[in-house]
Amino acid sequence: MKNFWEKLPKPFFCLAPMADVTDASFRRMFAKYGKPDVTWTEFVSADGIASKGIKVLKYDLLYSEKERPIVVQLFSSNPIKMREASKLCAGLGFDGIDINMGCPDKSIEKQGSGAAIMKDMKRAGEIINSVKAGIKDSGKKVSISVKTRIGYNKNQINEWIPFLLSFDLDALTIHARTRKEMSLVPARWEHVKEVVDIRNKMGVKTKIIGNGDVESLAHGKNLAKETGCDGVMIGRACFGNPWIFSRREKIPTTKEKLKVLIEHTKLFEKLLGKVKSFGIMKKHYKAYVNGFNSARELRAKLMETKNSKEVEYIIKEFIKNH
C-alpha cells in the first residue's frame, strides 16, 4: 500500500468528508488558503461509480494536484461494486481510498451502507477485502482507511475496533459518538484514547484519527495531546473558513471573507454548475456572512441569487457602501 501517512507530522490535520460540502470547488479553496495535511472528498457511491452513474459522479471525483494527499471516500454494501469502484479510483490517481462505515444518513443506511454496516461485521470485512482487491487489480499503490463511529446504538469499541484493526488498515478515523447520538451530544474524545490504547496493545501501525466537535487547530492539538491520536479531522468548523488549517494568526477581515466567497462561488459554477444545483453553494453563505453589521441583510440578498454574477454584484455593492 502507498503509505503517505508515515511522512505526516504529528498531529496531522484532515479535512472531513461532508456530503454536498467538500466538493471540488470547496477543496480548492482550502488548497489555496489553508491546506490540510490530508484532504477527503465527499462520500461517493461505489454502486454509482460502477454503473452508468459514473457520468454524473465523475464530477465528485474531480481533484487538483494541489490537494494531495487526497483520499476518496466510498460507500457501498456490495463487495463486487466496491471492488470495481476501488479499481477505478486507484486508476484515477487518488492517494487513498476510505470506506464510509459511519454515515447516519437514512438513504445511505437503507442500502446497508454507512453506519448500518456496523451491524454486519461479516459484510464489513468483505467490503474492506474488496477494496484491497480493487486496489490490487489496478496495479497501483494506494492506501486504505476506514471512517466509523464508536458504535451503532451503544459503545461497541471493544468488539468493533479490534475487528477493523485486524485488517491492517493504514488509517482509522473515529467519530467519537454512536450512530444513535448523531451530533446531538458532545463528542467524547476519551473514546478516541481507548481506540489508541487498543491499537497500541495490538501492535499494529494503523494511524488513529480523532473526529468530532474540533473547533480549531489549537483545539485539535490539545485533543491529540490528551488522547495520543496521530491525526485530527475537522468538519463543521471548516464552513466559511478556508483559513482554518493555515496556521496563520491573523483572523481574515470581513472584506477578505466576502472576496473569497465570490471566488468560491465562481469556482463552484465553473467546475460543477452543469451538474449541481446553485442551492448547494448557498449553504456556505451563512458561514461566510456573519459576525458583522448588516450581515443578516446581506445574507438574505445572497439567498435570492441565481448565479455568481448576481453574487459578485451584491457583494461589491455592499463593500462599496460599508
Image: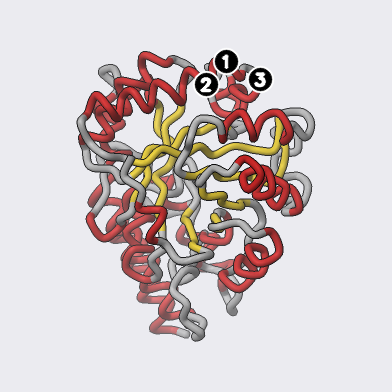
Q: Count the marks.
A: 3
Classify mark 1: helix, strand or loop: helix
**Residue under pointer 1:** 122
- Residue at x 56% of width, y 67% of height: 297
* Mark found first going from the N terminus, 3 or 2: 3
Quarter of the image where one finds residue 8: bottom left
Q: Nearer the viewer, mark 3 or mark 1?
A: 1
Task: Provide residue 320's location: percent of width, then percent of height.
Answer: 39, 83
What residue lies at 47% left-to-right and 85% top-to-bottom? 322
Image position, residue 92 (x, y; %): 21, 38
Q: Name the residue carrying label 3.
A: 119
In the image, is 80 to the left or to the right of 102?
left
Q: Residue 318: image x %, image y %?
A: 43, 76
Q: Quadrant of the N terminus?
A: top left
Quickly name the residue at label 2: 125
Residues 205 and 184: in front is 205
What residue type is disc 2 on?
Gly
- Residue sitting at 38 percent across and 37 percent down? 97
17 sits to left or right of 203: left
Q: Nearer the viewer, residue 201 or 218?
A: 201
Q: Amino acid at mark 1?
A: Lys
Q: Position of residue 36 (x, y in %)?
A: 42, 62
Q: Nearer the viewer, residue 201 or 193?
A: 201
Residue 92 in view here: yes
**Mark 3 secondary-structure assignment:** helix
Q: CA distance from mark 1 to mark 2?
A: 5 Å
The residues bearing labels 3 and 2 have C-alpha atoms spaced at a distance of: 12 Å
Q: Looking at the image, is mark 3 or mark 2 nearer the viewer?
A: 2
